[in-house]
Amino acid sequence: MRQGWSVAALLCWLSSGLSATWGAEIVVTTSILADGVHNIVGQRLQVVSLMGAGVDPHLYKPTVRDVRRLEQARVIIANGLKLEGKMEQALRRMARRTPVIFAAELLPPQKLREVAPGEYDPHVWLDPQLWAEVLRRLADTLGQLFPLWRQEFQARAQHYALQLQELDGWIQQQLERIPPPQRVLVTVHEAFGYFGRRYGVQTLALQGVSSASEFGLARVLQLAELIHTRALATLFAESSTPVRALEGVATAVRWRGGRVRIAGPLYTDALGKPGSPEGSYLGMMRMNVERIVHGLLPQP
Amino acid sequence: MDVVWTLAAAATLALACALLGSFLALRRTLLLGDALSHAVLPGVVLAFLWSGSRELLPMLLGAGAAALLATLLLELLQWRFRVHPDAALGAVLATFFAAGIFLLSRFAGQVDLDAECVLYGELAYVPLELVSVMGVEAPRGLWTSAALLAGVGLFVWLAYKELVLVSFDPTFAASIGRSPRKWSLALMGLTAAVTVVALELVGAVLVVALLVGPAAGARLLTRRLPQMLLVSALLALGAVGAGYGLAWAFDGALAGWIAVVAGGHVGAIVLLRRLRKAPASAQEPFAAEQDNDQAQQPG
Amino acid sequence: MIAIECRDVTVQYGHRVALWGVTCQLPAGQLIAIVGPNGAGKSTLLRAMVGLVRLSRGEIRLFGQAPERVRRRVSYMPQRETVDWDFPLTVFDVVLMGCYGELRLGARPRREHYERAQRALELVGMERYAERLLSELSGGQQQRVFLARALAQQAELYLMDEPLAGVDAATEQVVLHVLEELRRQGKTVVVVHHDLQTIAERFDWVVLLNLRLVACGIVPEVLTMANLHGAYGGRLQMLSDVAQVLEQRRQRLRHG
Amino acid sequence: MSWLEIFSHPLVLIAVGGNALIAAVLALVGCLVVLRREAFVGDVLGHSVLPGIALAFVLVQSEQLGAILAGALGAAAAAMLLLAALRVEPRLREDARLGVVLSLFFGTGIVLLTVLQRHGVAHSGSLWRFLFGQAAGITPAELGMAAAIGAVVVAAIALFWKELQALSFDAEFAQLVGLPVGWLELLYRALVLMAVVVGVYSVGAVLVSAMLILPAIAARALVRRLPSMLLVAATLAAMSAVLGVGLSGLFAGVPTGPTIVLLMGAVTALVMLAGARQSVLMQALQRGRLVWQQRQEDVLKLLYKRIESSGRAEWSSAELLRTLRSWRWSAVPVAFWLALRGKLRYRARRWELSPGGVQQARQIVRRHRLWELYLERYVGLPVERLHGDAEMLEHLLAPEMTAELERLLGYPTKDPHGRPIPPED
């Protein structure tokens, strides 16, 4: 994957950094990224995320102050792989003035899921192992930008990676409780690709990777058919997309005689409200897995 | 610096829209902008699917082609099939837009593309995209809107006489050899160009607001055409400035606030004129005639 | 010298026949009236003379040439109602439009044009209203502005559509005075008019029309009881019945 | 999945029912809107709903059907009020008023959206859905709501039919006649509001304005009378909805809402080109039929004149062919057609006009010569021009007009060229 950051950017960063009158050191797009970066830089650098909780990164409308923050940030970190829609285009063009790092694009392509020729699934953070690697690479890159704290960033990344490893083990163990045929995750838009790949959970979704594309009736019927034949019991709503779409599928399955309920909502593209348990990445993932397990375990 | 860039780009675009909007207001075809801003979607999507890239040029070509087709269809519906202008506009607008969404869902479903993202620009991003032309570094948006303003300005400067004549008295214009059809098509084409460029830059809602608001407000405030053009330009700049201030104060979407101000100020003017006229006991010398004039055209 | 020559002029709007086989020669330097009942095709004939209307059959020659080629020498004054009088223009702006025919794209009017417009305004007695807005004018004043605009064109042939319709007495006098002034200058003036009384007193030539030419010539010869009965009488009812039948059968009158 | 399976699937039936109902309701109201030349109001109202919904989201913090609808209704009503209020200023024309309200409300909608985003209200992004609509995801609750509002709209139109008709055609007259114009105007606006709000919730703002306008234009071109126009518009709309849902059910990636609109657009285009009376095709057909009828009458007249001049009433095949060809090549197929219709007979190796043929020919010649006399005596056309115009008019005269013409001309027996005018029989 091409390097998201270039030497030229470093030079102009040096010049613009000094003139920074106000604004965060690091500006990050999604709240999930912000949580990760915060775990790398700790208190050294101020981390600000543009998108709040429950916001669908794809349909995000920037405000004037967001632009000011981007303008004056020392480093901008975005997820990339077209998660941020229109904003990504603008950020790519900004790369000449301010260093912009596309976190997901730090990973080698073979580790990514290709959903269409040249298009990759951006939801890398839902696989803790992969997310740990992203953060590790991010720490190296940030280390180059801030040589003073290189070791510290890498140490913190390493420490956080252990927590992620522990989370990974916990998830593995939790998912064991679900009988294999039931290990199917049905959501509105296809966010759990990496999660499914990591833990052997099959994922089905109404929409493709982008939550903005409009699904047709055919997809609803096809999904309902699949759910009915596989006798699946639970559909999962998401925090950043409407639940109405799933109700259609549920109605279809119920009419075919199947029993199905809508659980969740799961957090996919954004963390929960700050301060709440699902306000941090680790909390969010635990909440998600608990809800998945609870949802997929056969009801008494 | 981002403030200056954004304001400059928005202001130049607003001026171009205000200038053009004034003539559209006189010809009562202000809604053309709204119709075209929807009608270009299929053209843009086809351009994207065909060229596989979101670069400006293919998008503009696609949008331009769609706008031209929409304009011809409008003419056909109105002249050949006697459909009322409003209905023709609505029909073309909706069908073209639906075609656009159809193409998007059918062929670009997987690729991360949607009406909101592929078509409508975002004014806030303007300062972030710097491009250097002849050594001067300025946002791409500023260059395009400056070129647009130059184009519209030149057109109005050169064809001012003809535009006024054709809009005021088409029959007389025809009798001295200036064909009204040719000039109205030229005006429609220019509107299509402004809409297409502005769409890519600031999004659909702002295009309509900038085309309609200042022109409608100026129409109320002034009595002579040259004054109207000037006042509509000032109102446009005012809308951009006030919009930016409000967007900054409430940390809201810039395009949204400018649209609110551009649309809202007309309501305020109407209210003020109502208040000023109602208690005014001493009628102006010609008010008698003016009143019957108003009676003749109940809007 | 013949100013206007019409040969078998036939005009069809969609499927309604407006003019049928009108053939006549109108002399130059005369005050000519086109008169006839409602729907007789008076305005259509005038607009045909300016080249604003496509002829289904026949042709029209102005000074021996096609109307399109002599635009500069012809001035046309449309009916008042065709215009939005709430347009943000002053009286002077409108009169100045009379000179636009000579100005190239982008060329600004020069001093001589301003003077010509000023003189035209004086001729119609509207010079005090030069800076006044259109929306502040009465019906008569609007008519005089249109007349001034026509005069500003300084043409040889003036074609005026109902210049005296619905105007106050003062404006009527001004218009008639201007018509006489134009005739004195040897210009040809063709006026669509309905009041036979004024025509008898003030006009030289008359074209009596009702879908087809009833009569054309000097006033005393044309305004005879027989002709008037022919034009206004009922016996041409059959013709309008047929026009009505054409309408129903959607039959285009293509012939010859 | 085949067509049959699709339409037996309960979910599809809901989507079909919902979309067809909404399309029909919008089409009914659309007719009134288009006839009142307010077609663009639908588009403006559709977009003005956005701030209302955003506000409902801010207050209720979730996607409750009731709250969303209340918000949408409130905003649309406010937009309508503002439109009416702005009407007080004559300098502000209709298109300016619509543009101002559109930008004001749509701008407010976007501003509220960013406020929602800032406060992290759940799935604020989904508001865009109300613009582009999610016609495939119609839920039973929405179907019920659409049915309820549909019933109200249909009942109101049926009940107050003549009043609404009068109001749309000539409001001043309606007032003079004593109709409660104020209340009727309110009723009309309420109908539009309800239809638009329900439509926006399920198919999106832009598709609403399409369904308001397209069926009305198509129906107007197809039928003359207002009641049948409403019926045809509603049927066309419902049919394209059913087909649209079916297609989007069968083929993946085919969006439901836009497909319905495209189908409706295609129907309208088809009607304009081929279906309607004044459509391109129909007029061509009519003209064709007329010309063919004229050709037959011309040939009959030609043969009758030959009988008149040569005194012989039958001809050999060669003679007949020579006569026809001398006049015009196309006369040959026409004669063949006349033979088929029994106007021309082949007896004992001879061609002759059948009694019916003779009778029709005489009538044509009679009309022709009467016309020549009229044109010569009243219209003052030069004699050599008479034949041309009379040639044209003879085909058009209805029998009663010919009798009236004869009475006017004083029952003449000779035409301007001295030829006898056959009596009427």
Image (cartoon, coloured by chain):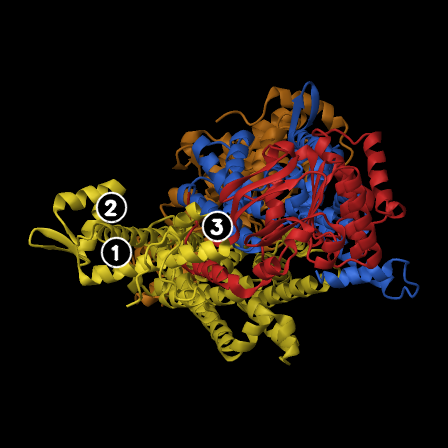
Chain letter, colour orange: A
Given the image, what chain letter belongs to the residue carrying mark 1?
D
Mark 2: which amino acid?
A: Ala
Specify the colour of chain C. red
Residue tagged 2: D331
Given the image, what chain letter belongs to the residue carrying mark 3?
D
Element class at badge 2? helix
Element class at badge 3? loop
Chain letter, colour blue: B
Mark 1: which amino acid?
A: Ser
Q: Position of residue C185 (x, y in %)?
A: 79, 37
- Residue at point 49% right, 64% down? D26
- Residue at point 62% right, 79% down? D179
Chain letter, colour yellow: D
Nearer-N-terminus badge (2/1): 1
Nearer-N-terminus badge (2/3): 2
Given the image, what chain letter belongs to the residue carrying mark 2?
D
Residue tagged 3: D381
- Residue at point 35% right, 45% down? A200
Mark closer to the observer (3, 1): 3
Residue tagged 1: D2
Q: Nearer the viewer, residue A170 or A12?
A: A12
